[in-house]
Amino acid sequence: MNMRFFQNLYILALLLILPLTGLANELSVKPENGQKPLIKPQKKPVQIEADRITGYYKQEIEATGDAVLHHEDNVLTADRMKYYQQTEDTEVEGNVRLERPKDTLKGAQLQLNLKTEEGYLTEPRYLMKKGKGRGAGDMLLFEGKDSYRLKETHYTTCPEGDNGWHIRAKELEIDNKKEVGTARHVSVVFKDTPILYSPWIDFSYSGKRKSGMLAPVAGYNVRTGFDIALPFYLNIAPNIDATIAPRIMTERGFLLSNEVRYIGHKNMNGHLQFDILPQDIQTNQTRWGVLFTHTQSIGKGWQGFLNYNQVSDDRYFRELTPNLAQTSLANLSQQGGVSYNGRLGANGTVSFTGFVQRFQTIQQDRFDQFVSPYERLPHFSMNAIKRDVGKMDFELNSSWTNFYHPTLVDGKRFVFYPSVSAPLRNEYGYITPKVGLHYTQYSLATPVENKGENIDRAIPIFSVDSGIAFDRKLQLGDRNFVQTLEPRIFYTYVPYRNQNYLPNFDSAVNDFSFAQMLTENRFSGSDRINDANRVTVALTSRFVEQDTGIERLRLAVGQQVNFTDPRISLLPPQVTSGKSDFIAAISGRLTQHISTDSNIQMDESKFWIEKVRTGISYQPEPGKVLNLGYRFTRNVLEQMDSSFQWPIAGNWHGIARANYSLKDDKILAGLAGFEYNACCWALRFVVQRLTTTTQTTTTAVFVQLELKGLMGIGNNPLQVLQQSIPGYTSVH
């Protein structure tokens, strides 16, 4: 036989073997009928590189000098290593480095079985690729795939050379599959000083949700004294979690706070907060508060909702809540119902709402004189719009409500307000005449002014809305803009009908504003319909960036002229009595860093200013913001409001806010503090003072040490800062 015969035989063998190899892979993955694979899958290959490689075939390999071992997604480097092929054991020493998908491990000596991933590493140093956690220890024990344990170790998220904080632990378990760490006998060390000890702590080094103890929350409030909470987080399911927080207050006692959050199918979500203080030290009473919200899609356009709030007593928020914004709450809503939104043909919509609603009115002290709103037991409303029917639009607003009040007149009210409009539009502008009839029927529990128990009211409403749009291109600096000029005229006629004898279930005077000028009724609700014979003339100009479409600036002026003096009013009067009011407004970003939102209202008949609301903000970069504001309402209020967040020196930032009443000569809301932001930790100190009623104030102190990637110790002031300082950003 010649050499060509053996070559042909070798090729034939390869052609037969290669298909069988592919079949073996299929069978090894999906054996049929529970049988074992016909061909066992091959082991994952191990590749070794080094300056020098010696060994015995299929027994052991020894590599020295820049040795590198590749196995799956892992890369092992060292000065020397041995690999035993039969057992898949490795013995490595000298500058050991194990590079894995989720971490990097370094040490002096390594023994590791590549199959079981069990072994040890001496003098270990580790770096987590998610969360940037790192540390060192005496010994690292590999305990299977994605899991290892460190002895006498420390952990921090600070970069190399910076040990601003770290935890010392007798033992630290790392689970790379769940991306969590569990430490035992833990000391939290800040600036080389132990500040907290815990026999056990676990944390997510990647930021994922997980059950476990959270950092203590501590603070001070003049009402509660020193206040510390020990929250425990429960990750019950991917769509359900909870926080249980025992809270100890030196002036009040022990309070248990319970919070549950959930989401589900069909847009279902909810939030339950229940706090209970079994025995208040000062009042010797059981005190509690509950908040529950729930929304859920029922299907086919229907949605259910529930919003329930209640506290045990009127002074609950003022004396027990850590959130000072809640101390000024006057009415807690208790509401539940259903709603529907759907289509009405091709060019129409219809909506329906039904609910019951009541309130808990909080009278915090003898100076409070809050009148609780009417309860609605129940309320039904239906609104519909049908457009482009014979070039006309039809609209219907209707409702039926049973109003109840313990001290005021009760009654049922039916509202039926159909209207029709005929919009005429082209590319230049529009004109829309509209006519409607507002019909209201009352069935009262007691007769009023010899009108009987059943009374009604019918008021026609006529309006014409018109506008034109012009635009031009212009260049300001190196930017191209489109400037618009949009004049608008809105006329309203509503005849006078005496309404003094009607109850007032839900009407109030809307704040006079640019938007309100362009509405038919200056009252909210349905019990008062204004008489009107007036025209509003408005002019708006917008500057829009041509390249981005962003509106950079808006200028608007408007004037409302009453041809007859309005006769319908609510006591006390809250609007001007002149025949003409003028409003000017400017809003937008004046420059890259300066923005404003301002408006002024003037009574031209008396030549005085009725209202001013102006604000300007300067924010050159995150962490730098300066806000100035001024509010004025004739005979009601005059306030200055200023706030800032600004670097002081290095990583130090000052934060402050002052809302000062010029009319009362006192600070209504004040806040001052500082924050220090390092690369891996932050310290915040904030003092907040609020005037809750005309006679009382409350003060709270927030102190928080945030160890980034681990915990925040103290009472978190971030929500307070974001609410008090527009544009505030947490600088990291």
Image: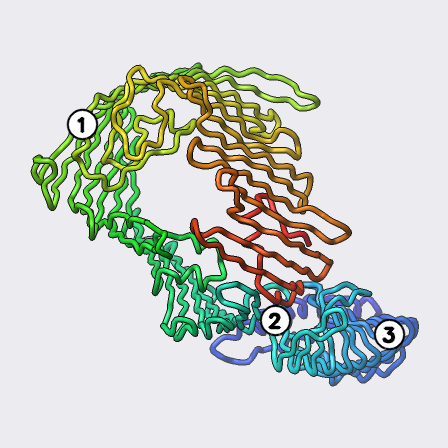
**Mark sitting earlier along the chain (3/1):** 3
Q: Which residue matches tag 3?
A: 95
Which residue: 45% across, 64% down? 320
In this rendering, the label closer to the viewer, 1 or 2: 1
**Mark sitting earlier along the chain (3/2):** 3
384 to 246, vertically: above or below: above
Indicate the quadrant where residue 195 lies.
Answer: bottom right
Callout 3 amino acid: Asn
Q: Which residue matches tag 2?
A: 203
| Circle 3 Cα neighbour tier, 10 Å, few/some/many (<14 / 14–19 / ≥20) | some
- Please say if the residues under marks 3 and 2 sit with CB atoms less than 8 Å apart: no
Disc 1 secondary structure class: loop
State the quadrant of the N terminus.
bottom right
365 to 18, vertically: above or below: above
729 to 134, vertically: above or below: above
| Circle 2 Cα neighbour tier, 10 Å, few/some/many (<14 / 14–19 / ≥20) | many
Q: Which is more toward the observer, 342 or 319?
A: 319
Residue 495 visible, this angle:
yes
Residue 422 visible, this angle:
no
Q: Which is more toward the observer, 324 or 127?
A: 324
In this rendering, the label closer to the viewer, 3 or 1: 1
Disc 3 secondary structure class: strand
Report, in whole angstroms, how far the alpha carbon at label 3 lies from the one at label 1. Answer: 94 Å
State the quadrant of the C terminus.
bottom right
Callout 2 amino acid: Phe
Q: Which mark is residue 7?
A: none
- Please say if the residues under marks 1 and 2 sit with CB atoms less than 8 Å apart: no
Report, in whole angstroms, how far the alpha carbon at label 3 lies from the one at label 2. Answer: 30 Å
Which residue: 27% across, 51% down? 338
Callout 1 amino acid: Asn
Q: Which residue matches tag 1?
A: 498
**Mark sitting earlier along the chain (1/2):** 2
